[in-house]
Image: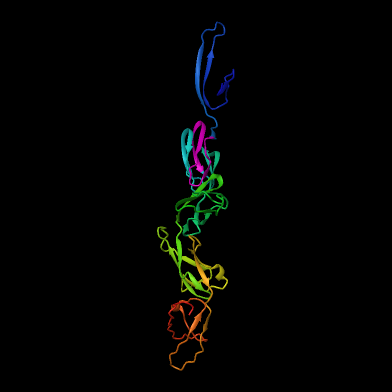
Amino acid sequence: EDVATVAADGTVTFVAPGYAEILCTATNLYDQTGVVQAQCPLHIEGETEFTISEKSTLTVCQGESATVVITAEPAASFIVVSADNETIYTADNEDYVTLTPTMTTAGDYTYYIVEDGTQKKSFTITVNEKPTVTITALQSVVCVGDTVQLEAHMNLSDGSFFWGGADNFDDATSGNPKFVATYDGHYPIFCQVTGAGNCVGTAELSLQVYPTPTVTITGPAEAYVGDEGEYTATLSTANTNIPATTSFTYAWGGGVESYDTETIAKGSFSESDIEEGAEVFCIVSTTDGTCADTAKYPVTVKAVPATFWATDTVFCYDATGFVTIESSEAINTAAFGVQTADGTSVNFEPVVSPDNNQNN
């Protein structure tokens, strides 16, 4: 009765697909004898019902495989075709089919189940674009203590960021975070981008952080007001492994400025430096402003000794004469010079008194 019903006159009504066996019994109504039975097996074919199972995965990321589970009740022969009529599967009297197409391009793709040339059911696979991301550090050489600026570039117009590999990002969810390098060594920086459908793309950056180099200054520790002392900055990158091709810049201060080469500086000190002294300093860093170190060099500044002619002098042309010059304090005759008012140097050979460097 689940498949067919039979009326008293022998009319059979088929109510569902399946198998039925029709039984007819003839009985002698007088004495209930002479019972005769006849059987007629029937196979009732009906409309096939196709179902896309909940076990299916119809939304995937680019490059992944979808899962399509098709059930047919009863078992049937059918084909699965794409929107452009390309057959992707042929079923031969099957009631359970699992398809796993690999989806390489983002978009929506509709497929049809066709039985005996008739479309019976359709389903759509949605393929979300997989993010691709690249990351860079804006500084080419980084040392301990530097602030590292990172940038991420992705192929999506919208997506969320997550950064890792350092423990002090200013904003680990932005596209261009910063962090401070607190130790030297290898930093395994990575950036994860999540797009539509929770599709994820990841990029990695191996960032090497070097120890900070050191700079020292050499030069005269004492100077007179107006002196142009020469000071030299020496940068040491020993044991830092900083690439030898790294370029450094030198910024001088404290009354001096670079000349000839960046590593050598000269300058004059003012009277205001006499009381407190001066401090020559040099900041050395890469052209990106990283790996910076500052050297400071104190200088004692003195007033220029007061000098005057001790006697009036008259000289004859091409003659040798003597001039006595007195100073308000001891001076180093080796560094003493004489010149005319117009700046012309005079051949000068000092003859020091017995009280060498004692005010005369």
Residue 68 placed where, x, y %? 50, 38
The residue closer to the viewer here, 303 or 355, is 355
In the foreground, 197 or 133: 133
Residue 74 painted magenta: yes
The magenta segment is 53-81
Query: x%, y% of residue 328?
Result: 52, 78
* Residue beneath the point at 46% across and 79% down: 336
Foreground residue, 153 or 85? 153
- Foreground of the two, 36 or 161: 161
Q: Is residue 40 above or below residue 126?
A: above
- Residue 211 image-quadrant placement: bottom left
The N terminus, quarter of image: top right
Q: Does residue 284 lie above or below 100 as drawn?
A: below
Q: Position of residue 212 (x, y in %)?
A: 46, 58
Q: Residue at x 55, y 40 (%)?
A: 122
Residue 331 placement (x, y as % from top left): 47, 77
In-image side of 178 versus 333 (left or right) = right
What is the image's colouring? rainbow
- Is 158 on the left-hand or right-hand side of 78? right
Q: Is residue 300 magenta?
A: no
Q: Residue most toward the front?
A: 354
* Residue located 53% across and 79% down the image: 306
State whether residue 333 appears in this view: yes
Q: Please, which residue is most extreme toward the top here?
A: 31
Number of dots carrying numbers: 0
Residue 154 visible: no
